[in-house]
Image: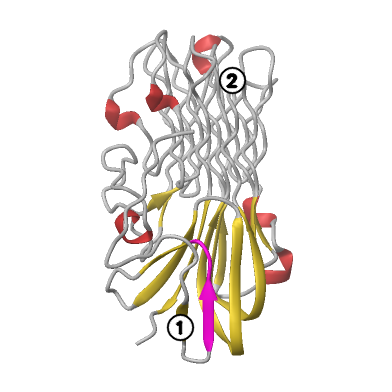
Amino acid sequence: MGFLGLTGFGGGATGLAQAGVAGAIAATGGTQYTPGNGYLYHTFLSSGSFVVTGAGSINVEVLLLAGGGGSGNGYNAGAGGGGLVHHQAFSISAQTYPVTIGAGGAPQNNPGGDSIFGGMTAKGGGGGAKYSTTMAGDGGSGGGAEGTETNPAGTGIQPTQNSPFTPNPSFSQYGYPGGAGSTAGAYSAAGGGGAGGAASAAGPGPGPGSKGGPGRSMSGFEYPIVGLSPFSPYAGSPTNNHYAAGGGGWGYGAQSPSSRPTGGGGKGGRYISSPDSDGLDGLGGGGGNSYYDTTTGVGGDGICIIRYTAPA
């Protein structure tokens, strides 16, 4: 699990606090924030329930993010970021909506867990490939490849999910493939894909590990106003709102701090381990390679954020 913190903002309340929604509707669940931008946010960092009472229905905006995949030690490629789902006009009415938050993938190339809300599923990120033993995993975003023709990059499957919600101009979902290996040999480990784009192919080496694919910028879901501690510089997001980057792959050379992908993915390692190899919790980042350490390279946990016009 990567770096995580919670910050109340603008009078936010922890736990299940009652809040009026458009007058006749009320909702509880998660941790609530009213940052003064006209919206009320319910943030779920663990599984729970979004409970709606009252008469009628309203539309809410939902960001749903799965857990990132895990990488691991050895000559490993980076793991894929969690799949990202964005519904800008999801109709809610009086009922209980279960919320499932996917955990980040464990080290040694495991996939991330799925996140689920309102019939929508964000798919966990794919695990990264490991030299000569483990193939790249498909996932929300795909894991990176190690090697060439015998070990293809993992596919980003999120865009093909949730068919009952598509086509719909208010509904979008994101996940991209991991990077391709460049040559046979240990230095050909690529990064995992992110919600903002595919990872590049591995470099020809020897050199720094390959960077993961970028996360996606989500306007209106900036970290401080949704209850996530300021991640800068950890998340590498200049706008503090990128989610679901892929993890970086193995390299013979050291990576600089700026090599953590934009949006919470772990950076690629070399011969020493580093906590920077973990994906960030709440951002669904893919785990990066962490050569000798079997406990790092963990994917970041997912998140569900529901926002709507704050009651007067």
Residue type at mark 2?
Answer: Glu
* Secondary element at tag 2: loop
- Across and down, in percent, residue 16 comes to 50, 66
Please tell me which residue is depicted at 49% across the width and 33% down the height of the picture: 1
Q: In which quadrant is the C terminus drawn?
A: bottom left
Residue on which the image places disc 2: 146
Q: Is residue 237 above or below residue 265?
A: below
Any part of residue 166 in sight:
no
- Across and down, in percent, residue 47 comes to 60, 53
Q: Residue furthest right?
A: 164
Q: Is 274 or 193 nearer to us in this picture?
A: 274
- The Cα atoms of the two marked residues, 1 and 2, are separated by 52 Å
Check residue 140 for magenta coloring: no
Left or right: 213, with 257 as reference point = right
Query: Between disc 1 and disc 2, whose residue precedes?
Result: 1
- Across and down, in percent, residue 50 comes to 58, 68
Left or right: 227, with 63 as reference point = left
Residue on which the image places disc 1: 20
Any part of residue 236 in sight:
yes
Q: Is 278 or 197 nearer to us in this picture?
A: 278
- Across and down, in percent, residue 171 comes to 57, 69
> Which segment did they paint magenta?
25-30
Q: Which mark is residue 148?
A: none
Q: Main secondary structure of the magenta part?
A: strand
Q: Quadrant of residue 144?
A: top right
Q: Quadrant of residue 38?
A: bottom left
Q: Is residue 200 above or below residue 71?
A: below
